[in-house]
Structures are given as C-alpha cells and as structure tokens.
Image (cartoon, coloured by chain):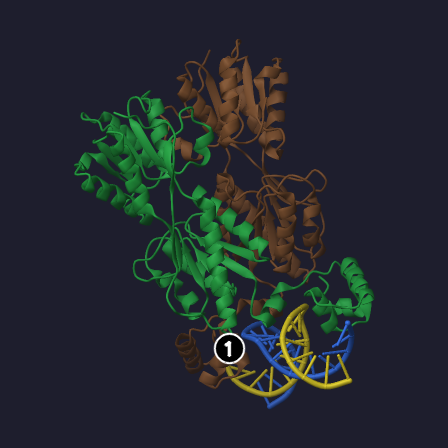
Chain colours: A green, B brown, C blue, D yellow
Amino acid sequence: MPSTIKDIRDETGLSLATISKYLNGGNVLPKNKEKIEAAVEKLHYQVNEIARGLVTNSTRTVGVSVFDVTDVFNGIILHEIGVQLSRLGYGMLIVDSSNDQSREEKNIRFLVNKKVDGIISLPVAGSSSVLNPAFAADIPIVLLDRQYRDRSLDSITLNNREAAAGAVNYLIGNGHKKIAVICAKQEYTGRERYEGFKSAMEEAGLEIRSEYVLDGTHSMEHGYNAMNRILKLKDRPTAVLSTNYGINLGVVMALNEAKVSYPDDISVVGFDNLMLSNVLKTQLTVMEQPMERFGQKGVEILMQRINEKKENNGNLVHDGHINIVLSSRMHMGGSVKKI
Amino acid sequence: MPSTIKDIRDETGLSLATISKYLNGGNVLPKNKEKIEAAVEKLHYQVNEIARGLVTNSTRTVGVSVFDVTDVFNGIILHEIGVQLSRLGYGMLIVDSSNDQSREEKNIRFLVNKKVDGIISLPVAGSSSVLNPAFAADIPIVLLDRQYRDRSLDSITLNNREAAAGAVNYLIGNGHKKIAVICAKQEYTGRERYEGFKSAMEEAGLEIRSEYVLDGTHSMEHGYNAMNRILKLKDRPTAVLSTNYGINLGVVMALNEAKVSYPDDISVVGFDNLMLSNVLKTQLTVMEQPMERFGQKGVEILMQRINEKKENNGNLVHDGHINIVLSSRMHMGGSVKKI
DNA sequence: CTGTTAGCGCATTCAA
DNA sequence: TTGAATGCGCTAACAG
C-alpha cells in the first residue's frame, strides 16, 4: 500500500495542513522542511493526484485526441505538445481514434470523465457533435490541423489554400502549364489544398484536365499509384503537385522505380519533408508546415482559455473564437526545372 | 458546472446510495430506474471518475510509456493496446519519453501519481531504476519490445536473435557467403539482432568482415548512408541484412537512386514491412514482427497481474516473471537471388 | 508559521 | 430494495 499524507504526519508529528502546504510550495520552518523531506524519502511518499484533483477541481492534465496515432504527423505534434505541457507542469492524456468517429466519441467522453482541464483535438472528419460531452462539461477545447464545418471553435490550422496556390504559382513562374495534382479531397486539409491548386490554375487561365487530378487518400499507396498512372499518360504533365507527405514518398518511389528522374523528366513540388529530407540525393521542393508551431500555439491558446476560465471562477468565457492560421514556407529543393 | 450525483438526488428524491448503486449496475425498482435515467439525461450527468477512483482505489486506466511517439512502431503498438484496453473498459494514459531517460523518469512518476492500475512500458534503454516509483507503489508493470539487463520483469519481446539468424541462414541457403549487415548495436533489439547475425555467420564458418558491419542507429538515414557505403566497396557483398524498418527505407532509397536493382545486383533481407509493402514493385523479403501480438499479449499479461493483485487484496504478487517471446515469421518477397 | 475543521463526489458499509 | 452515515486522500479556509 502506498503511503499517504497521514503517514507523513505520524512520522513527523506535524499536521496535515502544514505538510500539504509544504508539498505545494508553501513556507515552513527549515527544521520542519527537513522532517517532511526525510519522511517523504523514507516512506516513498507520492502525491495522490486523484485526491488532489477532487478537491482542487483541476487535474493539471490536458486531454489530447488524435485521429490516428500511427500517423507520423500526429506523432510529431503529440511530441511537441508533450514538451510544452511538461514545461508548464501539465500532463497529457492521449487518446487515439483510429480514424473512427464512434471511437472518437467514446474517447472524448473518457477525457471528460477523467476531468481533464482542457482538450486538444486533431479531429476525425465529421460533425462537432462528438464534442458535446465536453461542451456540456464546460471544458476548453482547441482544434488542431482540421476544423469543423458546422461549428466554429478555437483552432490552429495551416494556410492550406495559400500553400497549395503558392506551389502552383511557383511552378507557373518556372514556365509550367501542364500541372497535375495528387490529392485527397475527402480529407479536410486535402480539400483545402486542392482548392488552392484550383484557384491558382484558374487565375492563371490554365486548364485543369481531369486526368491531371488524381484524387485518393493521404497515403504512400495513393502517391505511388497516382504517379504511375501519370507516367503512363500519353500527354504527360511537366509538373506534379503532391499535397501530402505520404504522397511524396509514393511519388518518389514510383519515379525511382520507373527510372524517371526529377527534375529532368518531370518537376515535383511536395508537402512536408520529414524523414525524406536527409535521404534524397535531389531534395524535393516542398511546402513545409511549421509542425512545432501547431503544438506550441495549441497549448498556448488552450492555457489562455483555461486561465480565463479560472479567473471567471470556473465558468468558460464564451465570446468568440481564436483561429490561428499558420504560414507554410517553401523549402527550395532541386525538384523543379525551368522550362 | 457539471452536475453531480447530488443533483440527481434532488431531481429524483432518491438517496445517493440508491443512485450510486444503479449507476454501477445494481438493481432498483423499475420506476426508480426510469427516474434516474430521466434525470441523468436532463442534467447531462457524467460520472466523476476522479471521485470514483478515490474511493475504489482503482482508476480503470493503464499507463503506457513509449520511448518515442514519433516512431511508427510505437504508434502501431499504441494503437493495438488502445483497442484491447477499450474492449475491456479500460482507458489508457500515454506518455512519451522522446528517447530521453530523464523524461521517462518524470513520466513514470506522473503515471504513478495518477494512480494508474498498471503500466505498460516500451522503455528507453538504460536502467530499470526509472521504474522505482512504480515498484514502490506496487503497480504491475509489463515491458514491451525491450528488456532491462539489471532486473527481470514481465515482458513481451521478439525472438530477435533467431529472427536475424534465420534471415542469414536463408541467405546462406541461397548460396550467399559475402553478407553485410546494417545494424544498431546501441539499441536493445539492434544488439540482439546483430548477435543473431553473428552467430549464424560463425556457425556457418563464414567470415564477418569489418567493412560489412555497418553500425549506427535504427533510422532511414543510417540505412541510406550505410547502403551507399556498401555500394562503394571494392569487394561488394552479394547480400545485405537490414535489421530495422527505418533502415529498410534508407536501403531501398539508396538502391533506387543509384539505379542498383535488387535482387539482380544485390540481395536484401529486411525487418518489418509497414508502409513499404504495398508500394514496391519488387517486394522485400523481410522478417516480420507480429505487431498486434505485442499489444494483445502485453494487455493480457498486465490484466492478469492486475487481477491477481485484486484477489490478493491489493498486494502485488511477487513470484517470478513471465517472459513471452514472440516469433517472427519470414515474409517472402523477391529481394533474394539464388547464386 | 501551524493546526483544526470541513468538504470535494462518490461507493460502501449497515440498518431499516 | 433503500437510505443514513462514513471515509477515500487531499486542499482550503480560518483561527491561533
């Protein structure tokens, strides 16, 4: 049986209040401080956060819901969130929805029952109703990477449209007119990026040929298959926009395998670098997301909300939402040729 | 403010005890059952798991400590653990150590303070002393993937040595004598796999040439650099053993880039498939780990321990440890040539 | 600075 | 079956 604060009392002869105060950073006489520390050491005392949480009505824990833990992007963001929270003395409770909305619903409920002080969610697509238990419990929420269409919430997202449009304009600036896109319209970011592609093409008065739009999922498989289909086209595009990291990987694999080289035979602009960057002889030109910023900003906004709530004696402040749109930056590789 | 069981009492006129009993599956009169359900619905009542945990001394939550959330392997195992636990009505509290032992120590302490019912750890290499707080609190622990040298604990590991030896023997069976290995001796699994390579070579009476042993980390970068170094060797090996998934990726990238094709120019045996499997024209022959089994078995053993502890009225049973060694299986691709 | 007291929300005796 | 009373381990007044 783990020892409690009472054991410390019996060991030191001090009162519960004094001990509690010291453990929470309060001032006590030096000799009492020593007594307590000795007892803590001797009895291997560890605070029972459960009991503490019950009385303070705060767990110093943030719930983080991700759409897929096996996704590298999720992993990187989780990592950054963890670093930030730990710096603030907060813990994190991670739940994984495996891209399954019903699982996400259960997860949110779990977090609410666990009385987390706030929730950061990288949501599975769909309706914001999965968050209802959190709304009912007045728990601050920040969305990362994706947003809901049916409800406005605090969020950190990427300027997906501008990023994709920027990539297209860069290609156009290099003389390309026949530009293909490998995308995933069924996903939030994928749709946004496709829209960016589309508007840039239209503004430039360029034709969007249906065989140049390869729609699928954000995955290596899709990138690989799509690129292979592009390579078989009679009228091949001179450039390809890959809208996701997984797609990048598949594209490069397909090109290598077919012994088609970039940028000589075809130009490529991708999204995100990750593992790929240190490995390729010819680096990809990509639109990079400031991954760390997602985590940093997400935690920052959430903490702001949590503090607002405290100052408003426990009631969530409802007066509009903060939407932070992060800027992507273009990383110049050598995968685009001037023509 | 979220509603409590008292609000249900005021709403229904019943006593706390009756309501509590019903909420925990006890029997009540049909009309009372209806009353309670109506009140729960109306007030959006959610059990406060914190309070419940305090009195039951059980949180129905398992702590999972991983050495690196950004690692795909970790992600897959986390996913499986989550599925299993959720099936059993348990939640999971994930903490990420970022391959940093001091962070791992803080994380374990965090889990202990959060009163998790058990801990599953994919440990950062090092000493088992990071688990001391958990030992002191009598919390059941199961290790996954890696073990400690200084202390025996319940664990699920792969037959790393046999797997690597099997891969080597397969190459030898196909006539190869000059076999290189790209490995990571500084990591637990890496060292084991190297040992397997070594003993198989020695048993077959084959020379282990120092320039054929490329030691580094379990990463794409290492695989890429090592393969490039191998390709530059005057006396090139006829086959290469890649001991990790990340290394596989780097190896394939390097080969593709150099336009060296497998198995014609060089044979390759790797470890694990993951994303790679659906993408390559010529699939790699690999030793596959039964990823799901790690999660399944880990949860199974932990639950066994948790139940034993309950039956022993709260005291952990200390009578030896369970070490489950999972078998890898060889997945036949086309990356090995008979010579 | 220290100790006494009360209570967080719930499950669990034990009587009725 | 139900209810009144007790306590899980801790913090937050308040009084000393």
**Residue A32 coordinates in the image, percent (x, y):** 80, 67
Determine which quarter of the picture holds residue B336.
top left
Chain ID at mark 1: B
Decide which of B235, A170 is in the foreground and name it.
A170
Residue assigned mark 1: B5
Give amino acid for label 1: Ile
Mark 1, secondary structure of its residue = helix
- How packed mark 1 is, by other alpha carbons closer than 10 Å (few <14, some 14-19, many 20 or more), is many
Viewer can see residue B47: no
Decide which of B30, A293 is in the foreground and name it.
A293
Viewer can see residue A196: yes
Decide which of B9, A90 is in the foreground and name it.
A90
Determine which quarter of the picture holds residue A42.
bottom right
Residue lying at 62% horizontally and 56% vertically, measured from the top left: B110
**Residue B99 coordinates in the image, percent (x, y):** 59, 41
Residue lying at 46% horizontally and 15% vertically, measured from the top left: B266
Determine which quarter of the picture holds residue A11.
bottom right
**Residue B52 coordinates in the image, percent (x, y):** 57, 69
Q: What number of labels is visible?
A: 1
**Residue B232 coordinates in the image, percent (x, y):** 50, 13
Q: Residue furthest front?
A: A173
Residue lying at 28% horizontally and 47% vertically, measured from the top left: A191
Q: Is residue A186 left or right of residue A327?
A: left
Q: Is residue B107 left or right of residue B90?
A: right
